[in-house]
Amino acid sequence: NKITKIIWLAALVGDGACSINKNLTYKINFESLENLKKNIDIPIIFVSTCSIYGKSDDLIFENHKTNPLSVYAETKLMAESLINLEHSTIIRLGTLFGISDQFSRIRLDLVVNLLTLKAVNGDSISIFGGEQYRPLLHVKDVAHAILYIIENDITGIFNLAYKNFTIKEIGLQIQKHFPDINLEFVDQHFQDNRNYKVSFESISKKGWLPNLTIDDGIIELKNIFLENRIK
């Protein structure tokens, strides 16, 4: 069968993981795609990240100046430069949450997932600063968006998120599901300097809309934690 599209998900992901071995991150996140492009000329849906925008108080559109603040963001932006947008697509993901299926490893370094786990365990939740923005997106909606892009032959660069939340708002939303938890706001900024709220108007104009909300993610995470399905 003829291959018509490549969905490029392969990457070492997250600021912490990528900072451990910068050379390895460069090889995985950039050189692997560079090698593919040298050998195969097939349209690609490349999964990038809104982290490439770094820190900004403006509402960020796809043509906004990039300002990567980590090795992860730097290598993702470098990889973007390899993509021919005439026949390919770049999607820049917001911060993901939720579970994808019943089998895959769940990332617990993502803010909604981590704070929900803390709430289930009865731990106090400390929000440092809290005014930093994150564009959130359920992991299943990434799959929905990729499928929609393929079915409608969409090319270009698109921010992908469902709503912009401050970290404080995320904490308060989780507290609605766990009213007994102690939510503490600390007037001290965390070492993570990223702050960005993105516009997802471009993809919505193409007809794609997300299906799942932060509450959907919190509820499903709460259930699997309470059912002891994660050790």
Image (tube, rainbow, N blue to C red):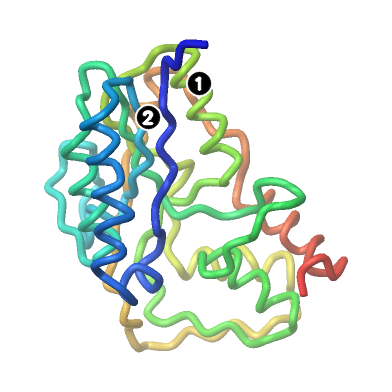
Residue 53, given in percent of the width and then of the height, sits at 22, 53
Kindly identify which numbered label has been placed on residue 50. Answer: none
Residue 108, given in percent of the width and then of the height, sits at 58, 68
Q: Is residue 1 left or right of residue 181?
A: left
Q: CA distance from mark 2 to mark 1?
A: 11 Å
Report the amino acid beneath label 1: Tyr
Q: How many numbered circles does the render carry?
A: 2
Residue lying furthest right in this view? 227
Residue lying furthest left in this view? 65
Report the residue at 32% width, 45% height from top: 198
Residue 45, given in percent of the width and then of the height, sits at 37, 29
Quarter of the image where one finds residue 46: top left
Report the residue at 55% width, 34% height from top: 143
Query: Measured along the vertical axis of the image, is residue 109 above or below residue 200?
Result: below
Query: Measured along the vertical axis of the image, is residue 180 above or below residue 151?
Result: below
Residue labelled with disc 2 = 45
Residue labelled with disc 1 = 148
Q: Residues within 10 Å of mark 1 (few under 14, many from 20)?
A: some
Residue 73, given in percent of the width and then of the height, sits at 26, 58
Report the residue at 33% width, 44% height from top: 48
Q: Split into 4 quadrants, where in the image is the C terminus?
A: bottom right
Report the amino acid beneath label 2: Ile
Report the residue at 73% width, 65% height from top: 177
Q: Nearer the viewer, residue 24 or 9?
A: 24
Q: Is residue 59 left or right of residue 187?
A: left
Of pointers 2 and 1, the one earlier in the residue sequence: 2
Closer to the camera: disc 2 or disc 1?
A: 2
SS category of the residue bearing label 1: helix
Q: Nearer the viewer, residue 59 or 44?
A: 44
SS category of the residue bearing label 2: strand
Q: Nearer the viewer, residue 227 or 136?
A: 227
